[in-house]
């Protein structure tokens, strides 16, 4: 018998209640990161990593870091890139991570003719991930609640620790209002939220963080 359960967000706590736990049994402890390691290093040369990745120095670099699985919304971001590029012509998407759908997403990027504006970095050692954040202009997490059509099980973002990493790295974050993400990101306080799979809303938030220097500085 369990006396206490620690949940990493209010969203996770609500899921535990759905399966029969009493609210008084649940403590919420949102995860964090080693902030000092992610804090921007004065004098860091972000041009070097961009060159190594083949990313133009003048690109508006949108970075996401995640497992390449359905709930992370990569299959939403890739088809969105042509329209994003119409409004932000120098936009470039950097995808960090690996997973079961990695090859499918790379094929999709090829089919959509995105190889000049999408870079797959693959797995990055966690001891270096902060350098990728420092090299970027905005962090994007497009997670949604994914329903398995066969089992009926939901797969959701229970917290999103990468959002904590990006924030500690002074990188503005734009994330889907999904699952436990609002437990980490408060809209217009430490990031911007958009409706899952809503390209109009994503574009609006990207343009806000790109064009509004005061807002951007407040978010980081």
Image (cartoon, rainbow, N blue to C red):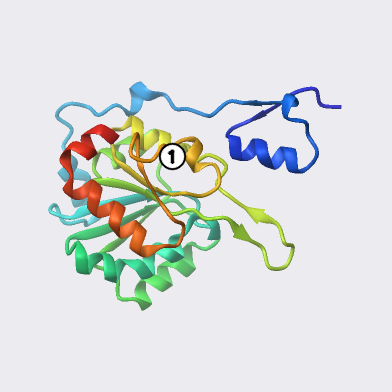
Residue pushed farthest bottom? 111
Of 53 and 41, nearer the camera is: 41
Residue 214 seen in this snapshot: yes
Residue 24 horizontal/vertical position (percent): 73, 24
Q: Examine the rendered structure and indicate whether residue 106 appears above or below residue 215.
A: below
Residue 126 seen in this snapshot: no
Of 196 and 37, nearer the camera is: 196
Image quadrant where residue 118 sits: bottom left
Q: Examine the rendered structure and indicate whether residue 61 appears above or below residue 128.
A: below
Is 88 positioned to the left or the right of 151 in the image?
left
Residue 3 horizontal/vertical position (percent): 80, 22
Residue receiving disc 1? 162
Which image quarter holds the C terminus?
top left
Instruction: Tell me what residue is drawn at x 17 percent, y 60 percent.
Output: 90
Asked which secondary structure carries label 1, the reply is helix
Residue 149 horizontal/vertical position (percent): 68, 68
Instruction: Tell me what residue is drawn at x 67 percent, y 39 percent.
Output: 14
């Amino acid at each position: 018998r369990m006396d206490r359960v620690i949940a990493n967000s209010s969203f996770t706590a609500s899921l535990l209640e759905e399966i029969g736990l009493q609210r008084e049994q649940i403590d919420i402890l949102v995860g964090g990161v080693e902030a000092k390691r992610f804090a921007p290093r004065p004098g860091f040369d972000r041009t070097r990593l961009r060159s190594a990745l083949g990313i133009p120095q003048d690109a508006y670099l949108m970075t996401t870091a995640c497992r390449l699985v359905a709930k992370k919304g990569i299959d939403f971001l890739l088809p969105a890139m042509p329209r994003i590029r119409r409004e932000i012509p120098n936009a470039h998407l950097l995808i960090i991570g690996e997973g079961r759908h990695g090859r499918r997403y790379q094929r999709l990027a090829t089919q959509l003719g995105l190889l000049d504006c999408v870079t797959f970095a693959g797995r990055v050692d966690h001891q270096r991930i902060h350098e990728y954040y420092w090299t970027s202009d905005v962090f994007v997490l497009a997670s949604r609640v994914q329903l398995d059509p066969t089992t009926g099980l939901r797969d959701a973002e229970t917290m999103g620790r990468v959002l904590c990493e990006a924030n500690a790295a002074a990188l503005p974050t734009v994330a889907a209002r999904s699952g436990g993400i609002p437990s980490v990101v408060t809209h217009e306080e430490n990031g911007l939220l958009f409706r899952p799979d809503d390209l109009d809303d994503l574009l609006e938030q990207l343009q806000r963080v790109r064009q509004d220097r005061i807002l951007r500085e407040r978010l980081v």
